[in-house]
Amino acid sequence: MSERRLSRLSGHAFRSGRFDKAVLPIGSTEYHGEHLPHGTDTLVAEALAEALAERVEGLLVLPTLPYGMSRHYYSFPMAVSLTTNTLMAALREIFQSLYGHGIKRLLIINGHDGNIPAIDAAAREFRAENPEMRIAVLEAWWETAARLLPEGTFEAWGGLGHGGEGETSMALAIAPELVEMEYARGVTPKLPPHVQVKWRFDELTPYGVTGDPTKATAEKGRLMMRALVELLTSFIKEMDERNWEIEII
């Protein structure tokens, strides 16, 4: 496959690539327990974007944004956080840069829960002002993957959790050399089913991990990766076929 990562493309290679859409991975830099790297969210979002670009023609992989809104994880060292307003501003300027260079189809792959409000607000505001720009978002891959895989794939909390079974499985699949499973430890908090409580993370777990990372395997991670890439590939193909217009039934 030819190079699709903008950071590695010369000017000539970019022009020759005939890119008509882009994918922007967004992660975070924060504590993920004693067993996972601080860049787990970034590594997963980037791996998904690069795997997707191998299957989709004309898809430009933008450099990954490695910082997000992580203030709610401050109680565990260390979290390097942007405010929601700063993240929104950065996203709007990225959108404007793409728009100004004629790339008006963008998929965002988000790797971190704290980024979701900023991504949603920035995308909606920019599109209101620039309706020709099309923006799609995979907001929470961890929830999507859990829905895509057969029931019973995960053993604890449906695979959910910060540094839990699903996320640790993804890390084992894409960067096993960075995972120290001998230190994996987590708890499953009991949260209300219908109303969100806005917690600080140390109120949920003493370990900086929710869910059960000890149930993670690389095979589960590969299943998650495969399901997500297939979903996104089909999504972009369908959107390209109708010029990224919303189908009205």
Image (cartoon, rainbow, N blue to C red):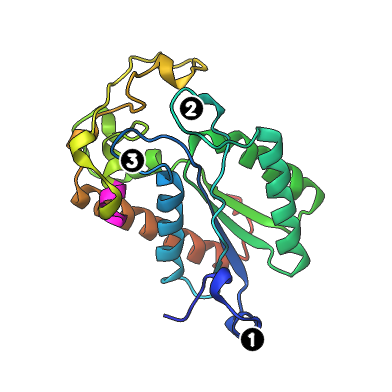
Question: Distance between the Cα atoms at labels 3 and 1?
Answer: 42 Å
- Segment tinted magenta in the rendering: 170-176
Disc 3 target residue: 147
Image quadrant where residue 163 sits: top left
- Packing grade of label 2 (10 A; few <14, some 14-19, many >=20) is many
Q: Earlier in the sequence, mark 1 or mark 2?
A: 1
Q: Given this view, does label 1 or label 2 mark the residue nearer the observer?
A: 2
As for residue 175 lying within the magenta part, the answer is yes
The residue drawn where x is 42% and y is 18% is 202
The residue drawn where x is 49% and y is 77% is 3
Left or right side of 83 for 161: left
- Packing grade of label 3 (10 A; few <14, some 14-19, many >=20) is few
User: Observer-nearest residue: 36 or 219?
Assistant: 36
Q: Circles 3 and 1: CB distance less than 8 Å?
A: no
Tally of numbered tags: 3
- Where is residue 13? Give x, y as percent: 59, 84
Q: Earlier in the sequence, mark 3 or mark 1?
A: 1
- Where is residue 184? Give x, y as percent: 23, 34
Disc 1 target residue: 12
The residue drawn where x is 75% and y is 42% is 125
Question: Distance between the Cα atoms at labels 2 and 3?
Answer: 26 Å
Q: Given this view, does label 2 or label 3 mark the residue nearer the observer?
A: 2
Image quadrant where residue 160 sits: top left
The mark found on residue 73 in the picture is 2
Question: Distance between the Cα atoms at labels 1 and 2?
Answer: 42 Å
Q: Earlier in the sequence, mark 2 or mark 3?
A: 2
Left or right side of 197 for 84: right
